[in-house]
Image (cartoon, helix red, strand yellow):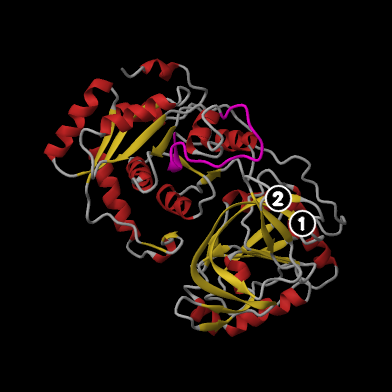
Amino acid sequence: MFDRSFLLTFNFFMALVIAGERSGVGKTTVTLTLLASLCQRSRQVQSFKVGPDYIDPMFHQHVTGRPSRNLDPVLTSEEYIKQCFTYHSDSSEYAVVEGVMGLFDGVTPPQPLNFLRRGANDFASTAHIARLLNLPVVLVIDCSRLSGSVAAIAHGYCSFDQEIKIAGLVLNRVGSDRHLSLLKDALEPLQLPILGVLRREENITIPDRHLGLVPTAELPQLQALIDRLAHLGNTCFDWERLLPLLRTRGQINSKFKIQNSKLEVSPSCPPFSIRIAVARDRAFNFYYQDNLDLLQQLGAELVFWSPLEDAGLPQDVQGMYFGGGFPEVFAQQLAQNSTTRDAVKTAILSGMPTIAECGGLMYLCEEIVDFEEKSWSMVGVLPTKAVMGGRLTLGYRRAVAVQDNLLVRTGTTVYGHEFHRSRLIPTPNSPLFQTYRYDCEESTGYEGWNLLPSLHASYIHQHWGDSLDIPKRFLEKCCVFKLTEKSCTP
């Protein structure tokens, strides 16, 4: 029997974690449907995403108008997650956390942790975040190939870990009234609330490609899709039960301050005078919002621009930040914009501090060789080619700096995430890091180019939320560059 007493035991916030019994069950669709319906009712909603995802948060932000926040204890820390969640939930009426993979799917931490009572592979899972924040979970089940067995799945997930409180189920991809009746009959003995029923919808599909969903900027019909989801959400959820679980209990005036944020630079170069050119368009859009916030909170002015569309760099900038994305999809257009490529190369060679992550790294290579084996000229700062292929490099990394570089000193350990289908030919002969799998001492090789002291180019995506020294060091280098009067003014 379902125990409702847990509703009285939650912490100061009430929010829902949307979890799946496995990957591909429709967590993102359910989350977007919830968000769209709430926002259509003029509600303020804060969304979160478990794990190192970039694209799902883009969809969240498109719906809510608020940046979605990543909750990842590998890239940050448990304490940072609690502070981040509390701070951002405090300013909204409702909060929704979209999970990652299956509810209990995580990674093995480098050393045993006391809370991992269910095994060593629960760290950074949706269940871990639900326990950490003491939040109820809604379990999404793909019912397309189920009838009576749905009860065994639900019962198993409810009983596997007594600290995880399943508030109810969302039955997804239900085929017919008869199918729904079979599912309800099977679930009835559990007395577990069915909080939503989504039928099979042929006209609600978000296209994907080699690294997941196609980003929002490339979907001209996205708003029409969101409108359909909002309409669906108005009828498919049990709002009487859902709304009390989603509503935050904020107004605690929580603070999310940067500690020791003073930059160690000359008073003649105050941090608020530093302008950072941040590449953001269809080719480059993989950024953790917290990273951008940290740069701004440290005093930098962010100037967003497009390597695809703009004829050069923004005026009077002292640093550049190229995030990840899909430069291989837009390689021809990037190649044709030779004026901008030349401006970027000139700025880097002049010593302008530059961060290039994954897709940004590829843009700085001599060429990108796409999936059709066509070669396209890129910036040409790095003496290598980025060659697309079928092999996916995926996973958390522990990276140890082998040399002093723009962001960290020799011997510093950082944690990041790799997710790409390209490889560099040749590999770097002066790397930034020696890398290891997060969960063991197995080396994955060497990573990143340390070609210039002002350039940090690597496949590894980093979240700076618990590593404030990184953006501080970057901005300090930008201040030094400004003082040498080498600012790029096209």
Residue 260 horizontal/vertical position (percent): 79, 42
In the rendered view, does 71 fall on the left or right side of 76?
left
Name the residue at the left extreme.
178
In the rendered view, does 105 fall on the left or right side of 201?
right
Q: Quadrant of residue 139?
A: top left
Residue 290 horizontal/vertical position (percent): 61, 48
Q: Which amino acid, by three-letter code, is at mark 2?
A: Val
Helix, strand or loop for disc 1: strand
Marks 2 & 1, CB-CB < 8 Å contact:
yes
Q: Residue at x 34, y 46 (%)?
A: 26
Helix, strand or loop for disc 2: strand
Magenta-colored stretch includes residue 101: yes
Q: Main secondary structure of the magenta part?
A: loop
Magenta-colored stretch includes residue 312: no
Q: Residues within 10 Å of mark 1 (few under 14, many from 20)?
A: many
Q: Which amino acid, by three-letter code, is at mark 1?
A: Ala
In-front residue for pair 305/211:
211
Residue 389, compared with residue 262, is above or below; it is: below
Instruction: State the quadrant of the C terminus.
Output: bottom right
Residue behind mark 2: 414
Q: Residue at x 44, y 16 (%)?
A: 8
Q: Residue at x 32, y 30 (%)?
A: 154
Q: Residues within 10 Å of mark 2 (few under 14, many from 20)?
A: many
Residue behind mark 1: 401
Q: Which mark is residue 97?
A: none
Residue 241, compared with residue 321, is above or below; it is: above
Residue 451, compared with residue 158, is above or below; it is: below
In-front residue for pair 106/445:
445
Instruction: State the quadrant of the N terminus.
Output: top left
| Magenta span of residues | 94-116
